[in-house]
């Protein structure tokens, strides 16, 4: 995969709306270090369990059992989901020598589809002992076609609004019926009609109202249907809404940036109508970049401005935020999103061939930033 | 990957007693007793199943559909090592004599995406309707 594609891929991940935060924000006892100090708890059975084929939005439950084979009581400080969110209950809180611990896991599968794994960890009071890790993995299927429906409005001229349509079917019922529609943004609504040779499916049209605010918008349309195996379908939607002033690029992809390397990126903001305008100021709501703006030519009001972003970072991590471009035009304050990944000065970039997938376009080779010395 | 999946054979067999081989099933001998166990047997074989998690079977009373999935559980891919082929057999016992049924197969990939594997195949179940 070409580096530019990799950068876009990584940036795309960065800019995706974050629906759920990882439950595990607590650092390792010794950050980033697996101590190798043996703990007293030993799982009875494989700590990597497999669940039966399941449908999206169902909940998988499993009980893990461990035994304290050490000479001292062990206190469970925390049982947590390393990835995604899950409900974990560990009992008892203190396990006497020879006693057993039961960890009950309720794992909502959400919109996962395909082979997936959920990882969990136990943190105890044992000095120097790393987390105990355990997992649930399995296959999640969708009862619908397509499996990953999306409403994509693309670049939208605000005054016109936009529409995005898709057909959805389920081969698990004779006729797909809509029980309810929940939408997380007032500027979006959904209309439905029948689809398919026997009208067994649904044609859904999402409509973005001309009143939608400027900038990148995204959310989820949640359907309730008559498919008993999976009554819920979540359809993400996204749009880039602009009025008269349109950026040359959005979201602004800064890609991979090395610590202490100066990165500049120029974005052009142009008036569709050719109207002259001025940029009064630019506010950085993320705090990651400095900015400057100048007319594309000449001085004073112009129909085109260049906005320069300068990134000068001191530490690795994710970089992202929003620029508010305040102009002298009424109702044309533009929010522009930007994002990138700051890597260490000596961090190595390696190519990973993710191999073949069933959908070649969905699983291309990728480049990742490897954790390493800096 | 599913795109490179090769279906070596897809055979529909109709029978009134199990087990049946495809070439034995063309002329079933219906009896009143056997009619209650009318069935359509689908057999297929596949090679190069990399990326394939399993198979889904669909049935309709009309060639143009709509089709409905009839295997409640995914038929898991067996991933026979090359050059061998994996062979599969699915028995549809929810059929009635004297009716024609239409079937097709999907693969479902390891990433959960369904993809059409076969064309629509018709099979008439011998016997008199309602028996």
Image (tube, coloured by chain):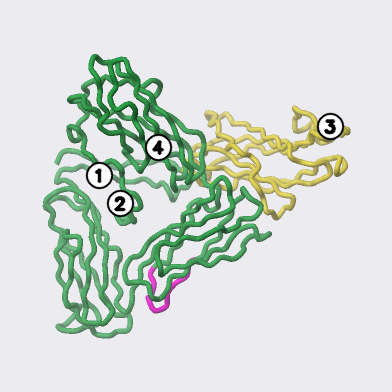
Q: Most prominent secondary structure in the magenta stretch?
A: strand
Q: Earlier in the sequence, mark 1 or mark 4?
A: 4
Span highlighted in magenta in the image: A155-164
Q: Chain of mark 4?
A: A
- In three-dimensional space, the C-alpha distance between marks 3 and 1, rounded to whole angstroms, equals 65 Å
* Chain drawn in green: A
Secondary structure of residue under mark 1: strand
Q: Are marks 2 and 4 on the same chain?
A: yes
Q: Is residue A246 magenta?
A: no
In contact (CB < 8 Å): disc 1 and disc 2: yes
In contact (CB < 8 Å): disc 3 and disc 4: no
- In three-dimensional space, the C-alpha distance between marks 1 and 4, rounded to whole angstroms, equals 22 Å
- What residue would you read off at disc 1? A369
In contact (CB < 8 Å): disc 3 and disc 1: no
Q: Are marks 1 and 2 on the same chain?
A: yes
- In three-dimensional space, the C-alpha distance between marks 2 and 4, rounded to whole angstroms, equals 21 Å
The disc placed on residue A117 is 4
- In three-dimensional space, the C-alpha distance between marks 1 and 2, rounded to whole angstroms, equals 10 Å
Vertical side of A71 occupied by A157: above or below: below
Measured from the top left, where is residue B83 in percent x and y?
55, 30
Q: Is residue A159 magenta?
A: yes
Q: Is residue A362 left or right of residue B91?
A: left
Measured from the top left, where is residue A168 in percent x and y?
56, 57
The disc placed on residue B34 is 3
Q: Earlier in the sequence, mark 1 or mark 2?
A: 2
Q: What residue appears at the point 26 percent right and 19 percent down from the top-left corner?
A: A40
Q: Chain of mark 3?
A: B
- What residue would you read off at disc 2? A10
- In three-dimensional space, the C-alpha distance between marks 3 and 4, rounded to whole angstroms, equals 46 Å
In contact (CB < 8 Å): disc 1 and disc 4: no
Q: Earlier in the sequence, mark 2 or mark 4?
A: 2
For the residues carrying marks 2 and 4, which lies nearer the camera in this image?
A: 4
């Amino acid at each position: 995969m070409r580096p530019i594609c990799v950068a876009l891929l990584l940036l795309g991940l960065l800019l995706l709306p974050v629906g759920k935060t990882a439950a595990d924000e607590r650092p390792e006892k010794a950050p980033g270090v697996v101590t190798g100090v043996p703990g007293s708890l030993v799982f009875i059975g494989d700590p990597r369990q497999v669940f039966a084929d399941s449908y999206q939005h169902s909940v998988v439950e499993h009980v893990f059992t461990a035994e304290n084979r050490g000479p001292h009581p062990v206190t469970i400080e925390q049982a947590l989901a390393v990835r995604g969110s899950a409900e974990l209950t560990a009992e008892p809180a203190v396990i006497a020598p020879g006693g057993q611990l039961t960890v009950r896991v309720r794992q909502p599968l959400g919109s996962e589809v395909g082979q997936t794994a959920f990882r969990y960890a136990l943190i105890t009071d044992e000095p120097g002992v790393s987390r105990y890790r355990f997992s649930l993995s399995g296959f999640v299927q969708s009862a619908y076609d397509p499996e990953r429906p999306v409403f994509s409005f693309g670049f939208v001229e605000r005054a016109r609004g936009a529409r995005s349509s898709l057909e959805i079917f389920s081969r698990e019922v004779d006729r797909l019926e809509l029980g309810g529609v929940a939408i997380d943004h007032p500027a979006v609504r959904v209309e439905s009609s029948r689809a398919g040779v026997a009208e067994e499916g649904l044609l859904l049209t999402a409509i973005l109202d001309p009143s939608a605010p400027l900038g990148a918008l995204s959310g989820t349309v949640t359907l309730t249907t008559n498919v008993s195996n999976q009554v819920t379908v979540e359809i993400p939607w996204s749009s880039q809404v602009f009025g008269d002033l349109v950026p040359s690029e959005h979201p602004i992809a800064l890609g991979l940036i090395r610590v202490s390397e100066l990165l500049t990126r120029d974005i052009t903001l142009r008036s569709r109508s050719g109207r002259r305008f001025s940029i009064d100021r630019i506010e950085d709501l993320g705090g990651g970049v400095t900015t400057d703006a100048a007319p594309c030519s000449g001085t004073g009001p112009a129909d085109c401005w260049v906005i320069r972003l300068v990134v000068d970072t001191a530490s690795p991590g994710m970089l992202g935020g929003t620029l508010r471009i305040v102009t002298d035009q009424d109702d044309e304050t533009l929010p522009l999103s930007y994002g990138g990944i700051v890597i260490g000065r000596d961090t190595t970039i390696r190519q990973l061939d993710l191999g073949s997938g069933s959908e070649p376009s969905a699983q291309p080779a990728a480049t990742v930033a490897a954790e390493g010395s800096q | 990957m599913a795109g490179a999946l090769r279906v070596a054979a897809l055979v529909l067999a109709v029978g009134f007693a199990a087990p049946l081989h495809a070439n034995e099933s063309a002329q079933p001998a219906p009896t009143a007793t056997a009619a209650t166990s009318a069935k359509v047997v689908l057999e297929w074989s596949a090679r190069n199943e990399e990326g394939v998690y399993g198979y889904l079977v669909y049935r309709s009373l009309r060639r143009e559909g709509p089709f409905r999935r009839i295997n409640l559980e995914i038929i898991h891919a067996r991933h026979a090592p090359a050059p061998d082929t994996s062979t599969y057999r699915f028995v549809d016992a929810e059929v009635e004599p004297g009716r024609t049924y239409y079937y097709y197969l999907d693969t479902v990939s390891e990433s959960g995406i369904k993809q059409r594997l076969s064309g629509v195949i018709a099979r008439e179940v011998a016997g008199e309707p309602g028996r």
